[in-house]
Amino acid sequence: MRILKGHLLSAASPSRLQSIPDGYLAADEDGILRYVGPQLPQPLRTLPVEDWGDRLILQSFADMHLHAPQYPMLGQGMDLPLLSWLREYAYPTEARFSDLAFARNCSRHLAAALIGGGTTRVCMFSSLHTDATLILMEELERAGISGYVGKVNMDRQGGAGLRESTEESMRETLRWLDACGDFRTVRPILTPRFTPACTEEILTFLGRLAAERGLYVQSHLSENPEELRLVGELCPDCAQYWETYQKHGLWRDHTVMAHCVYSDERERAAMREAGVLAVHCPDSNWNLCSGTAPVKTMLREGSWVALGSDIAGGAVLFLPHVAAAAIRASKVRHMTEGEDFLTVPEAYYLATSAGHRYFGDRDGFQVGNPLHAAVVDETNLPPAARELTAAERLERFLYLGDDRNLAAVYANGKKVK
């Protein structure tokens, strides 16, 4: 067994931290937690313990929306709105994934950066290239990351370098799925890029495939005013954006919809009814001048919301900083719309437990969950003027920490950093 000792701090609910000073996490040989608490049971007391002293042992992070082939353009094009940014930066960069050596190098660097920042689970877009997507899945699994990766479908838009015919899109999706059988921790997820990039024929095909094979789906929803106008022009028979997915069988339990900045009460109710996960990407929404999502309202209504870096629309891969950005974004909503803002426990929940739920976990560190954890080293942070509570230490890490402040990272019970 693997046994960790330290100051355990997990998101037990959207508003409550569970703090266990001098606590223990014990995981079996399959990486599953068999004990969480303040004192080891007698049968475990003779086993070796990785003692981290008073260091915080946090849940690792789950990044539920990011674009792997955009990693090379991180921090570029931040002066453009969404659709212009896609045409001028994102699509040409993603086209480079046709070069498999480039795709391998990019994927390996991204996987290392994710683990280095304490992110052990992901829901990720690849490009439309089948072989590059398989390479990405290999590199993520090799690094110790679990999650879902999708070969993107887009049979319109994209330009000359990033477009597939409808027939090619169908054929390559099936070839990709057939090649995914040997992966253990990284699984396929159907990924229509977004409604403007997909014909009705490909959306119908993907909806049928989702039903026949029991596959999850991810895409984008109500991110940007210009995007919404375009969807309305392309799909005049649908009153709202979400209905363009529902119409084709893609609006299902565990469907992941990124952004939801302009999701009104009716669209949010449709998410709750179907079991759709909304992924809040605050840094991206600001950078591309899309808006500020009503996250606090969604939580109050009982919607399922998690966080995504959305690189490279988001310029920050380190998910604790995305959590801090979510708090800042909610304060903008508070100042402009009167909506309550997120607390630190809520932001930590969105960055951890809310995403881990997608993989079947219960909230926080709980027996039966796989061990996914990150050990925080605060030695290079500013000296505190007094002894800080665990919640204050967490807050400081979210705002001031970086990958240098992670002494160790565990994924599925294995030490990966």
Image: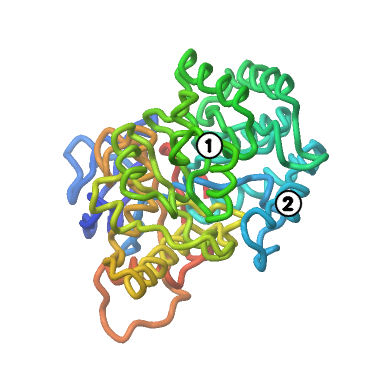
Residue at figure coordinates x 24%, y 37% from the top left? 367
**Residue 414 visible in the displayed image:** no
Residue at figure coordinates x 44%, y 76% from the top left? 381
Residue type at mark 2 is: Arg
Residue 37 is tagged as none
**Percent position of residue 114, x then y:** 55, 50
Crowd tier of the residue under label 2, counting other residues whose Cα lies within 10 Å: few below 14, some 14–19, many 20 or above: some
The residue pinned by badge 2 equals 87
**Residue 175 visible in the displayed image:** yes
SS under mark 2: helix
The residue pinned by badge 1 equals 236
Left or right of 179? Residue 88 is: right
Residue type at mark 1 is: Pro
Left or right of 107? Residue 307 is: left
Left or right of 326? Residue 194 is: right
Task: Name the quadrant containing residue 188.
Answer: top right
* Residue at the limit of the structure toward the bottom, as seen here: 385
